[in-house]
Amino acid sequence: MKRKTIRSYVVSILMCSLLTALVPFTAFGETKNNTWYRCTIDAERTDFENGKYWIQKVTYENGATTTINPVDRFTFLMINNQFIPNVNIKNENGHTLVPIRLITEELGGKAGWDAKKKTAAIDYQNKNIILQAGDKHAVINGKNVVLPIAAQIVDNSLYVPLRAVAEAFQIEISYNLGLMPFENPLISLDGRAKRVTKEEALKVASDAMKQAYTSFSKNPAYADGSDSSTKALAEIKQKIDQLAYKDESAGYWILIGPYDILVDKATGALFFKYGKKGTSVSGSYSEGITPVNVNDPEVFARDFFLG
């Protein structure tokens, strides 16, 4: 795309209403209240007698589900610490491609589409991107930029290189293994203001774990005086005392304690990543991310007392 042509597209698109000619895009919006998931064996899809492997079902807070297995890779997506289920993320020549309208609108921005010119106009917090399907050239915040790979239409959506978009929007991006089942990757994007430092996250989590332990250690179902109970409680207490920084994502500080503890960088909300990692599962297998309730008398039961 020549510079003169790009300038004409910019003028044309900015003069058009973003409500006009949105085909072939599908409308999206900001996802709310979808911060956790639970992964279990999918009994309906699993052939327990003759199947090569068991099928798992990921169920999200909002009721959406994703079917996975231990063999095929699946890339999960989280935006502003909200899971965006079942996004078809592409990888081409080492570059991750994502549907630009979904990403933009989940972040709270706007996307317009000129179907005739196959050109998109993206606006997010006074940052602008002009993209054309099949072209490696783009206008990002008024500057002509060459993308690592051309934007392309896939399944009626315009796909673009993820990192280029994140850099243009000036948002955090991360690629984590270990937060989703079977070490499947999780891509996280976050445009929120970070109000919780790593040091504050460690303090908040430590205080919460000590409070949770006080509640849990009074539950006679687990604190029954037996050798196994005493050993498990001592292990939990030790892990709390040794709580430490482990990693981070775009939106979470990830700490290691009785479980991996996720501390939201914007809100300070706490979540546990529970469940056994690996590709071997049993019929009682369960894995997930769950909010921390320090007053829950069952708060440390998973993994330490229950399978």
Image (cartoon, grey):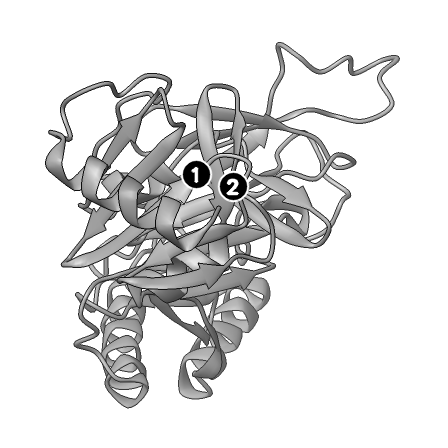
Disc 2 marks a residue whose amino acid type is: Ala
Can residue 81 be seen at all in this image of the molecule? Answer: yes
Q: Dot 1, crowdedness within 10 Å: few (<14), some or many (≥20)?
A: many
Q: Residue at x 74, y 34 (%)?
A: 72
Residue assigned mark 2: 151
Image: 74 above or below 262: above
Residue at horizontal 74 percent and vertical 37 percent from the top: 70
On residue 132, the disc is 1
Left or right, 18 with respect to 89, comes to left
Counting labels gives: 2
Q: Quadrant of residue 26 in the image?
A: top left
Front in this rendered view, residue 95 or 289: 95
Q: Vertical placement of 156 versus 126: above or below?
A: above
Q: Is residue 130 left or right of residue 233?
A: left
The amino acid at mark 1 is Gln
How far from the left and from the top, in percent, is residue 211? 22, 72
Placement of the C terminus among the 4 image quadrants: top right
Q: Secondary structure at mark 2?
A: loop
What x and y, as percent, mark residue 170?
31, 68
Q: Earlier in the sequence, mark 1 or mark 2?
A: 1
Percent x, y of residue 296: 25, 53
At x 55%, y 54%, the residue is 303
Are the residues tagged 1 and 2 within 8 Å (C-beta)?
A: yes
Which residue appears farthest toward the front when viewing the image?
4
Secondary structure under tag 1 reads: strand
Residue 160's x, y, as percent?
A: 49, 44
Of residue 263 and residue 228, the one placed in the foreground of this image is: 263
